[in-house]
């Protein structure tokens, strides 16, 4: 290799290294936020009405991802009663395939829409909500230790602490956890990875209604320091007598 070729390769290596150093650090992971449930739920219902009878056709990938937002829409029947085949396809094939792709960030986007659909439909208690909750819990079963799974792990931890995925226990559990956080809702939402509009959902409103009924934990009195026994002073005369 000639000197010119050597210096050419060296210069190329230095330039490649400089390009790596100029590259900005990757942005820190951001907690996913669901779409606007009120608006998207209605639009998705309209889209489904145009999609035709074949449950495998008519929806784009992003529409499948946001389908839980259309489960419960005011003035409409629950979507599983209107589109049973399409909903079965979502639970059995579409959602599992999306979560199994190995892309943790994409999986978080699917899960946050799912969690928002559950929270928005919470005032429709009954078999459909309980079935939704069971499927929701199963969708968290594959959460791993990858850095991209950090948000999903925080939601799983919240479920263990409050029974979030159990409709009969979620309101009381979340209200107690919020009360223990001194009722500071914005900090509580950030700590658990819940989206800023969570308290506008049916579940969030129920938690706020239940908050005043949560008993306040009695304050624990500060421990009283142990009394150190004090040896009484011996009068000088008695002391001298003892020495005599």
Image: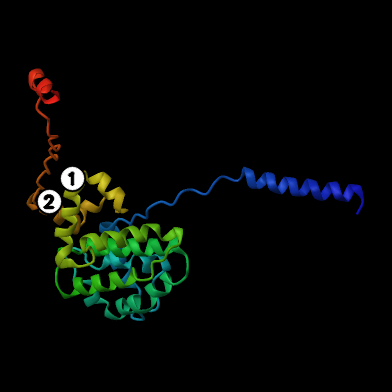
Which dot marks residue 208?
Answer: none
Q: x%, y% of residue 29? A: 44, 52
Is 38 on the left or on the right of 29, as rendered? left
Residue lying at 32% horizontally and 53% vertically, measured from the top left:
193
Distance Cα–Cα, label 1 vs label 2? 8 Å
Is 13 on the left or on the right of 35, as rendered? right
Q: x%, y% of residue 145? A: 43, 63
- The N terminus, quarter of image: bottom right
**Residue located beneath label 2 in the image:** 211
Is 214 on the left or on the right of 103, as rendered? left
Q: x%, y% of residue 158? A: 27, 59
Render colour scheme: rainbow
For the residues bearing labels 1 and 2, Cβ distance under 8 angstroms:
yes
**Residue located beneath label 1 in the image:** 183
The residue at the far front in this view is: 244
Question: 28 or 127, which lies in front?
Answer: 28
Question: 231 or 106, which lies in front?
Answer: 231
Residue lying at 28% horizontally and 70% vertically, measured from the top left:
137
């Amino acid at each position: 290799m000639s000197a010119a070729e050597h210096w050419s390769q060296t210069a190329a290596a230095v330039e490649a290294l400089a390009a790596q150093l100029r590259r900005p650090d990757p942005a820190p992971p951001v907690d996913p936020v669901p779409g606007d449930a009120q608006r998207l739920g209605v639009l998705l219902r309209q889209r489904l009405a145009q999609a035709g009878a074949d449950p495998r056709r008519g929806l784009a990938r992003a529409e499948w991802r946001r389908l839980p937002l259309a489960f419960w829409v005011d003035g409409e029947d629950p979507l599983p009663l209107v589109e049973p085949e399409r909903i079965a396809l979502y639970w059995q094939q579409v959602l599992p395939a999306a979560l199994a792709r190995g892309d943790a960030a994409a999986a978080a986007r699917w899960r946050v829409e799912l969690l928002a659909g559950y929270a928005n439909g919470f005032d429709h208690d009954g078999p459909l909500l309980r079935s939704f909750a069971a499927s929701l819990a199963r969708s968290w079963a594959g959460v791993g230790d990858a850095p991209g799974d950090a948000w999903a792990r925080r939601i799983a931890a919240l479920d263990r602490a409050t029974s979030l995925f159990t409709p009969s226990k979620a309101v009381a559990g979340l209200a107690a956890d919020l009360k223990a956080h001194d009722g500071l809702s914005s900090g509580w939402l950030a700590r658990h990875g819940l989206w800023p509009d969570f308290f506008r959902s049916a579940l969030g409103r129920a938690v706020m209604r239940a908050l005043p009924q949560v008993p306040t934990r009695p304050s624990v009195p500060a421990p009283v320091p142990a009394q150190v026994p004090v040896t009484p002073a011996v009068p000088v005369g008695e002391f001298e007598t003892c020495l005599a």
